[in-house]
Amino acid sequence: MKTELGLRAEQAAPIVALLDEDLPHRLPGAAPSEDDEQDEDPLRRARRFAAPLLRGEVLDSGEPALAHADGVAAILAGIGAAPAMQAASYLVYAGDYLNKPEETVARAFGDSYAGLVMHTRRLVQIQRAAREAEVEQQRRQEQTELVRKMLLAFSRDLRVVLLRLASRLQTLRWHAASKTDCPKALASESLQVFAPLANRLGIWQIKWELEDLSFRFLEPEAYRDLARALHEKRLEREQAVETARAQLEAQLRGFGVSAEVQGRPKHLYSIWKKMRGKGLDLARVFDLRALRVIVPNVQACYVVLSKLHELYQPVDGEFDDYIAKPKPNGYQSLHTVVIAADGKAMEVQIRTREMHEHAEHGVAAHWAYKEAGTKGYAGVSAAGEFEEQVAQARKAVLRQLLAWERDFAAGGGGGPAFDDRIYVFTPQANVVELCADATAIDFAYALHTDLGHRCRGAKVDGQMVPLNTPLRSGQTVEVSSVKEGGPSLDWLNPELGYLQSPRSRAKVRAWFNAQVQAQTRAKGRELVEKLLQREGRTAIKLEELASRLGFKNADALFEVVGKDEYSLRNIETLLRPPKPEADEDQLLAQKHTRSTRPGAGGSGVLVVGVDSLLTQLARCCRPAPPDAITGYVTRGKGVAIHRCDCANLRQMAASSPERVIAVAWGEPASDKGGKPVLYPVDLVLETQDRPGLLRDVLEVFAKDKLNVTSVNHQSGQGRPARSDLSRMNFTVEVSDAARLNQTLTALTQLKGVRSARRR
């Protein structure tokens, strides 16, 4: 009887070819013996490698490890997998008993098998964690993570799909054959995750058997009742199906219609699901006996339908035209239910060969793999049309994996957990994982940082799109780039939406930071080299100079010099011979000596009783004419000039009163151009934050013709008592501090300014 129980080996060949595409047909080994040279069968070699490791070992399920690997290989062989693919089943399980499985398998069989072992073993660990979770919510979260990890593993190596499906089917078969209890979590996972995956990929043989076995363990009473009811009618059904098949094929041939008629009994879980979903009893399930008619073209489909309704009585309300209106997944066929010669209902499906291939094999039915099965891979150019066909088929399979993931989420398995990332394809059909709403720039950075920097355009599914267009799962993205260049500052603007990935944004910021750092170092290098030219020391090595100054290398020196964090005077001091320091004792001895001249020194400060002493203005209080000032004799740095009300001066004078020296401002000093010398003065403003306040303050300074050299803003946050106030610090240059009174008064009149004073 020509009855289809599921996916036949020749029908499974396309997807098996897809899953085998990365496997070598001849496995490389290390130092092969004479037996290895004669025995090039990869299946035998892999079993010989794994048998000593697996023999006597038992899996978590209780099944002998070697018997499990044998069963997986047999399942793969049953659907037409190549010996190389069957060999992988032994290596994956052998990896559990090796110290360094990836390295060992890579040395003995190659990197392709090592990668397969790595992805599969990691996936098995996730599956175990999902099943061991005791709390239902936790189990659901673990199962969601399982689906995500499965998708990642499948996208990296499509061979993992078939291995995991075959392994799970073998586990369920063992529980059924040995009559040992199957864990509910394992059966539920098989029904909710693995069977839908097989369905999405069109591997019907594995799909229906996974469903039936899971049904057997999850609903044992319902399974037994249904199996018993069907068994009582089994011979009758099989005879009726074969009689109807042969009769219809002969009748269509008599009408001149070339058609292939197949019998298709329904499996137990499908029957039970239909009965429960529609509230039917077994007698009302019309497709227990079903025929499938395969014809050359669409016109022949409707011809067969017409002839069928002439030969048999159709059942009202049981006709569907999925050719004119295909299902969302692309399924096409004519469905009708008729009353057979024995008076019982029978479903008939009518479709073309192309429709049948799509329905049976799903996305794996791509004809390129059939061509590969006859021509082989070696005879096809890597850059030819075949490679493009392979890439398109890989995309089709991976899109079905994405659809399977969405099905799982929509069914309550994943929910929002799957909304945080997407999967897109490169033109070579490689999968790239991105965050949700990622753009083509995020895609480019995910491939390579330098490609992201140089990205200038993108095509999505062959169409040019703006770089800030959000991507969706399943799209094919191709970016165009320039030979040299960098990112745009606009990419960092969140309102423009160019970047969604934090990783991409970090790479863009790092690029700009590197540019700023390079500019800073260039500026510092230029300043240092000019100083060396002025000092006539251009022969000195820059690395040696940096080392003598305490820096790790010359770049570190250039960076701090370029940032104005390191004074060039330190380099001058290193290069020049030391000058005699001011004689501290002499300064103190001459403290009470009076000078008859009214002023001295280019600093504009007259030190009473001493001519041309080294003087410097103290930074703590920033004195400026006509402030009342006092001098303090420092150790080795001359006289520091402080304002008389300086708190630092009071502390130093209390501990060392003998170092205080009377000073006074001399005549107003001028620079070489005749302009008055300007003195830096610090101002402090207590403010309440409001928009435009800084602009208004700067306008007051500009109106009074004061040059602002530094601005610092300190927020009130962190000071609970005054969290509503902020502090603004300004450094301005004045020739006469008396002018500041008018400026401070004007500042206090601004809205939001609570006080304004000198520091």
Image (spheres, rainbow, N blue to C red):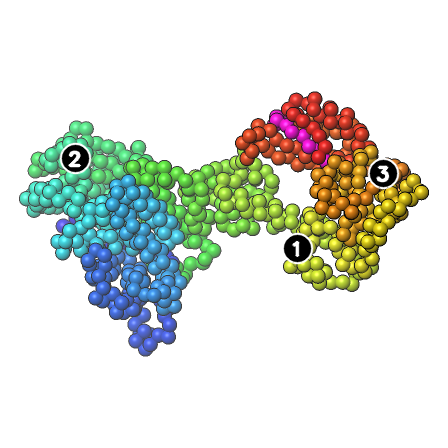
Cα distance between the residues tagged 1 and 3: 42 Å
Q: Is residue 386 above or below residue 287?
A: below
Q: Position of residue 701 (x, y in %)?
A: 75, 29
Instruction: From the image, tell me which residue sits under label 2.
Output: 276
Crowd class of label 3 (few under 14; some 14 to 19; many from 20; radius 10 Å) = many
What amino acid type should be assigned to the residue bearing mark 2? Arg
Q: Is residue 35 left or right of residue 212?
A: right
Which one is nearer the viewer's eye here, 370 or 410? Answer: 410
Mark carried by residue 739: none
Instruction: From the image, tell me which residue sits under label 3.
Output: 665
Give the mark, 2 or 3, whose residue is nearer the N terminus: 2
| Chain part drawn in magenta | 682-692
Q: Position of residue 249 (x, y in %)?
A: 17, 44
Residue drawn 75% across the image and 56% down it: 571
Toward which corner of the image does residue 109 lie, by quadrant? bottom left
Mark carried by residue 556: 1
Q: Is residue 344 magenta?
A: no
Q: Position of residue 345 (x, y in %)?
A: 12, 35
Cα distance between the residues tagged 2 and 3: 104 Å
Residue drawn 25% across the image and 65% down it: 54
Toward which corner of the image does residue 35 lie, by quadrant? bottom left
Give the mark, 1 or 3, whose residue is nearer the N terminus: 1
Crowd class of label 2 (few under 14; some 14 to 19; many from 20; radius 10 Å) = few
